[in-house]
Amino acid sequence: MDWSAFLPPVIVSVKVALAASIFVFLLAIVVARIMANCKLRRGISVIETVLLLPLVLPPTVVGFISLILMGRRSWIGIAFESLFQQTIVFTWGAAVVAAVIVAFPLAYRMIKAGFEAVDPDIEQAARTQGANEWQVFRYITMPLARRTLISGYILGFARGLGEFGATLMLAGNIPEQTQTLSTAIYIASEAGNMPLAWSWVAVIILFSFIMLMLSNRLVKE
């Protein structure tokens, strides 16, 4: 096997998935906590539907919208370029952004379910003992929901690792920079290099199998 051709997409994919999963995990915790505690039911279903849209939209649609919102002519793209002297699109950072967008809904749903499963009476008991909201969250809610939090992180990592459509449209397919396992498999199969494509397929299946197995075990414990 030509390791110089095999390893770069694996390394890029793992780096992108790790960076994206951290962003997704932190963002999902904040949003899920707000949504789980929100008392205003009117409009909540609309907001939650918007948050979950990337879960059901075709990845190419997500990539197209992201490209329009972050392209050089958008205010986000203009602001980013003025600050960093480079564009967002077709960079490693764009691959992370694409992975964050598509992985967020999956992690959010799992983490929100964990927060909602925590007995509110236990949280209220801590408040009556003088604990503030941060202390309740840190010492009561987080430990009780830890399994679903970890599971949410794992699922976010797995989803980011396997992203294809949005990544291809927003970050492109630049070898050793934005070429992930999914895009590398597509290019290799198009070029007829089936042994290399199968080796990448085996890697991504192995990663996904291990992470899903860990997630399932955490939820069932």
Image (cartoon, rainbow, N blue to C red):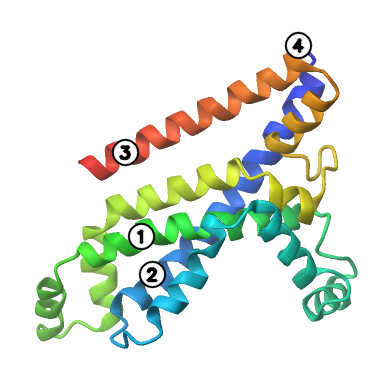
Image quadrant containing the C terminus: top left
Nearer the N terminus, badge 1 or badge 4? 4
- Mark number, residue 1: 4
With respect to residue 106, does 130 lie above or below? below
Q: Secondary structure at mark 3?
A: helix
Nearer the N terminus, badge 2 or badge 4? 4
Do callouts 2 and 3 mark residues in contact (Cβ within 8 Å)?
no
Q: Residue at x 45, y 78 (%)?
A: 46
Using the image as rendered, state which of residue 46 and residue 98 is in the foreground: 46
Do callouts 2 and 4 mark residues in contact (Cβ within 8 Å)?
no
Q: Secondary structure at mark 2?
A: helix
Using the image as rendered, state which of residue 30 and residue 205 is in the foreground: 205
Q: Nearer the viewer, mark 1 or mark 4?
A: 1
Q: Nearer the viewer, mark 3 or mark 4?
A: 3
Q: Residue at x 31, y 53 (%)?
A: 148
Cα gap from disc 2 to disc 4, whole angstroms? 45 Å
Using the image as rendered, state which of residue 97 and residue 15 is in the foreground: 97
